[in-house]
Structure formats: C-alpha cells, structure tokens
Amino acid sequence: MPNTSQITPGNALKTLKLIHLALLLGQVMFGAVAFLQIRNLHFDLDFNGQPLMIVVAVLAVSAFTVGNLLFNKQLEAAVSRTSLTEKLSGYQTAMIIRLALIEGPSMLGIVGFLISGNWAYLIVSGVLVFWFVILRPTKDKIETDLNGCRAGYTELIKYHLPRYLQISRYRFYHRVYRQQDRTEDTKHSVRLARY
C-alpha cells in the first residue's frame, strides 16, 4: 500500500496556498462584516482613552518582528534537513506559524474597530492584511527560501510543469550545455594550437 502521508512539492504548495487563502478570506470577510455593522465611524489616535489601541499597536509590531524571527529560525532548521520531504514539512510549519502570528493582531484590530468604530483599528488591520497578501506562498518564494535547493527545484519543476514542457525544457538545456561544451573544447584546442 503506498504511503499517502508523504509530502510532495505539489501537495505542499497547494496546501500552503489553501491555508493562506482561508486565513486571508477570514480576515477580509470579518472586516467587511464589521464595517457594515458600524454606523458611527470616527478616527481617533488617543492612546490614553483606548487601552486596546496600545495592545493592537504592540501586537502588530510584534507580529512583524517575532514572525520574521521565528520564520527565519525554523527555516534554518528546515534547510539543514536532508530530504526534500523534511524540508517542505519544516517550511510549511514555519509559514503557518508566520501567517498565524499576523492574523491574530489583524483580527484583534477588527474587533477593536467593531467595539469602538475607530478607523485606526481598521487601518492597522488593513496594513497587516496587506503584509499577509505579500507573504502569499509561491513556487519561487519556496525555492528562494530553501536556498535554491537543487533537488527541490527539480522536484518542483517535475510537479508543476506539464510533461511536454518538462521534456522540451530538458532538451533545451541539454542543447545549450552541449553547445557550451563544444565551444569550450574548441577554445581550448585553439589556445593549444597557438602555443
């Protein structure tokens, strides 16, 4: 019986994209519902009268810094693993933690907006949602984050390119490298002939 629990590059990318989309839609929909519920909107940056404003601001800044620190620390551990499956599993874990750390303060900001009707909360949440969108997982980002692991690159190509493109890409690279080898051989033979 085949092992279906093993992570493949295609499955890892699909899973991360699905998780990212679900968390993003949760924030956007909750923000839209909160916006539609509030009738008395105002903008106030008074930190003295609203202690929740301080909490949201501190958590938003912490989400950026702590999220990046934890992500980089777990990414280093994932890169040091030997197999591609272990690397992808570590990358998934690091990315999910990073996304969750951003989602928490964003949701709290929306709750603050829902309670007070203050635009400042929604602006903080909007900035966090924008950052969340920027962190959308893609094949290129995974390759870059995993230090361009050659095995990972070929596996990602294998799972994301149609079969005919894989063959034509192989033939193209094969021709280019073969051409380069021939020109280097002729250069060396020409240099040897001159001396």
Image (cartoon, rainbow, N blue to C red):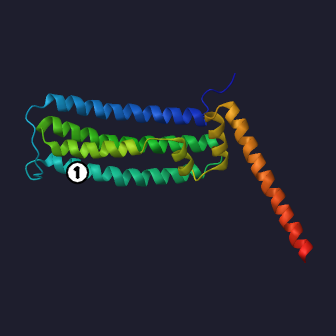
Horizontal arrangement in the rendering, residue 134 relative to residue 75 (left or right): left
Horizontal arrangement in the rendering, residue 49 relative to residue 74 (left or right): left
Residue 11 against residue 153 in the figure, above or below: above
The part of the image, by quadrant, that contains residue 114 is: top left
The residue labelled by disc 1 is: 57
Percent position (x, y) of residue 123? 22, 45
Point out the residue furthest to the top here.
1
Instruction: Quarter of the image for the C terminus: give it.
Output: bottom right
Visible residue check, residue 83: no
Residue at left 46%, top 43%?
Answer: 95
Residue at left 52%, top 32%?
Answer: 14
Visible residue check, residue 25: yes
Residue at left 10%, top 52%?
Answer: 46
Amino acid found under the numbered disc labelled 1? Ala
Percent position (x, y) of residue 194? 89, 75
Percent position (x, y) of residue 141? 51, 47
Instruction: Quarter of the image for the N terminus: give it.
Output: top right
Residue 169 against residue 144 in the figure, above or below: above
Residue 154 against residue 194 in the figure, above or below: above
Point out the residue furthest to the bottom here.
195
